[in-house]
Amino acid sequence: MKSKVCAKECPVQAIDNENPKKVNEKICISCMRCISVCPHSARRLNPVMLSAVDIALKKVCSERKDCELFI
């Protein structure tokens, strides 16, 4: 029996509850919650994409920044 945890935990309901393999890519926000909650590791992130995100985040998060408040 399929778990369907990813469909239940998706914050925008982009994953079909009846068929968790089916994702509405128009509303998916790529939050990766489905990957983190899947007990079967059925969902994975493309390693090339993960590497690109890692490099981009290291560039912008390499040094501490002052807090800012926008009103």
Image: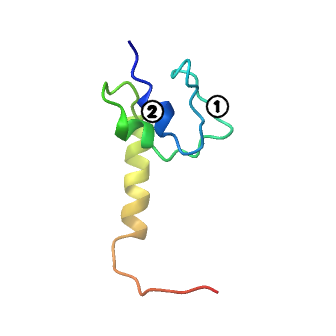
Q: Residues within 10 Å of mark 2 (few under 14, many from 20)?
A: many
Residue at the (49%, 47%) spot, across then down:
31
Nearest the camera: 27 or 51? 27
Where is residue 10 drawn, in percent x and y?
Answer: 51, 40
Nearest the camera: 27 or 4? 4
**In the image, farthest residue toward the top:** 1
Identify the element where label 1 is drawn: loop
Against 16, residue 31 (above or below) is below
* The disc label shown at residue 6, or none: 2
Against 11, residue 47 (above or below) is above
**In the image, farthest residue toward the right:** 26
Image quadrant assignment for residue 70 = bottom right
Q: Quadrant of the C terminus?
A: bottom right
- Three-letter amino acid code at disc 2? Cys
Where is residue 22 drawn, in percent x and y?
Answer: 58, 22
Nearest the camera: 5 or 63? 5
Identify the element where label 2 is drawn: helix
Residue at the (37%, 24%) spot, across then down:
42
* The disc label shown at residue 24, or none: 1
Residue at the (38%, 12%) spot, across then down:
1
* The disc label shown at residue 54, or none: none
- Three-letter amino acid code at disc 1? Asn
Rendered image coloring scheme: rainbow
Q: Could you tell me how far apart the alpha carbons at marks 2 and 1 are, in whole angstroms? A: 13 Å
Q: Residues within 10 Å of mark 1 (few under 14, many from 20)?
A: few
Nearer-N-terminus badge (2/1):
2
